[in-house]
Image (cartoon, rainbow, N blue to C red):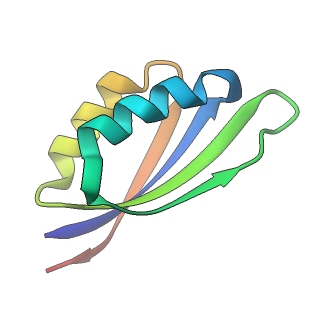
Amino acid sequence: MQIVEIDMKLPYKERGAILSKIVSKLGGRIRDIHFHPPDPTGIGEVRMEIEVENGRSVISELKRLLKGGRFSFMILSEA
């Protein structure tokens, strides 16, 4: 089991649609989520901690879902 922190930069207007897809895929594995306001260019930041078995599979799925945004990830702990 791994705890992974994902830092996403999304267009603010499309944030709801993208996050609803992510939540439907990850469901109850989300431990914590923080929303930051958009910058002057309209890009908002979302930080999410999720609990997964294999972090690489989640990353490949996020690449497919986040076509209009960027993200980075960091593995916080492994058990």
The spot of residue 27 in percent (x, y) is: 27, 48
Asked whether 29 or 79 is in front, the reply is: 29
Please tell me whether residue 37 is drawn above or below residue 47 in the rendered image. above
Q: Quadrant of residue 31?
A: bottom left
The spot of residue 5 in percent (x, y) is: 41, 61
Please tell me whether residue 25 is drawn above or below residue 54 in the rendered image. above
The N terminus is located in which quarter?
bottom left
Give the side of residue 63 with respect to residue 48, left or right: left
Q: How many marks?
A: 0
Please tell me whether residue 14 is drawn above or below residue 56 in the rendered image. above
Residue at screen point 77% across, 46% down: 37
Residue at screen point 30% across, 36% down: 24
Give the side of residue 25 with respect to residue 9, left or right: left
The spot of residue 12 in percent (x, y) is: 69, 29
Residue at screen point 43% across, 32% down: 20
Asked whether 41 or 25 is in front, the reply is: 25
The C terminus is located in which quarter?
bottom left
Q: Quadrant of residue 67?
A: top left
Which residue sits furthest right? 40
Q: Quadrant of residue 10?
A: top right
Residue at screen point 82% across, 39% down: 39
